[in-house]
Amino acid sequence: MKKERLPRGFWRAPNGSVRVLIRIKGFPPAVRTFKLHADTPEERKRQLVEAELWAAEARRKLYAGHGFVASADQAMTLGDALRLYAREGLSSRPSNKRKDALRIETILRDEIAKRRLASLSLPDLAAYRDLLIHRDFERRIRAAIEAAEATAEGRARQTRLRALIALRRQARRDGPEAAEDLRRQIARIESEEGIGPVARTTISNRMQLVNRAMKFAAQTTHGVPQIAGLSMPASSPGRTRRPSAHELEGLLSHSADAHPLLPFLIQLAISTGLRRERLLELRTSYLKELT
């Protein structure tokens, strides 16, 4: 029997069905299976014609960008938009520019950076936001695992935290259909182990950077989707009190054991309200006198 020759991206399964896979850089794969209703030459020909027509239409829709962008700009990916923003659109303030440059490097390592702007939609960006939330939780859980003491109680906590990672991954795979019992179990372990709310600022900063890059690209590209309507994680609970004088005295008395300069830095932070990053940028030449 003469071997059947199929177009590129077509596969014939043992049961006779034809599977078609359309892969175009920057777009999610398009896949469809065409069943064989009768093992006859006429039916196989009809099946193949139907598959080829679908493949041609799928390619046309992808290259057309679903009507989002003009043909001249359809090849621009999110990574291209981020690189363009890094070259021409970043803030002139050195500290902000440095932070955004680091965030851009991080996003460029993610799969979403390879997606064409023409194919990006609000659900795609929402899925990326959820991925960032998931990563933030896992990062903090793993940090808690590493910080657990090498005691029987510490090893038991490590076991519970590893179980929490497995449960969160299971819930992520199940999606909205995840069982309510599973969600309650995750919430209970997080509460017992002190795994607090997600770092909203970290997630929001990265998503807003994506939005700024897409807006910057939209100055020359029609129809780039915006994420203004995308909800962000709830804000973390704000501080409700300041440390008392007695608490500060105890903190200062014990901090010298960790480092001789730490009491001075604590007093400087209290007096000036400087955040950690600004404190680390200080040089002795900036200060009029050291006490």
Image: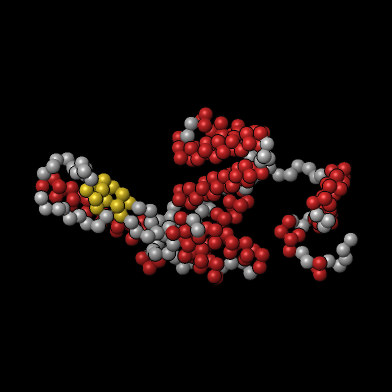
Residue 160, compared with residue 71, is above or below; it is: above
140 vs 163: above or below? below
Judge left or right: residue 282 versus residue 12: right
Tell me which corner region of the image, top left, top right, bottom left or bottom right, holds residue 192. Answer: top right
| Residue appearing at x 73%, y 56% in the figure | 276
Q: Is residue 191 visible?
A: no
* Residue 91 coordinates in the image, percent (x, y): 62, 66
The x and y percentages for residue 182 are 52, 32
Q: Residue at x 33, y 56 (%)?
A: 23
Q: In which quadrant of the rendered view does residue 64 lie?
A: bottom left
Residue situated in front as seen by the camera: 279 or 206: 279
Q: How does the figure colour the protein chain or chains?
A: secondary structure
Q: Which of the 4 image quarters holds residue 261?
A: bottom right
Residue 259 on image: x %, y %: 80, 54
Q: How many marks?
A: 0
- Residue visible at 59% across and 36% down? 159
Residue sitting nearer the eye, 133 or 260: 260
Answer whether residue 14 is visible to the viewer in this image: yes
Q: Is residue 230 left or right of residue 290?
A: left
Residue projecting furthest to the top: 181
Which residue corresponds to the image point at 85% horizontal and 49% vertical from the top-left? Answer: 252
Quarter of the figure that contains the C terminus? bottom right
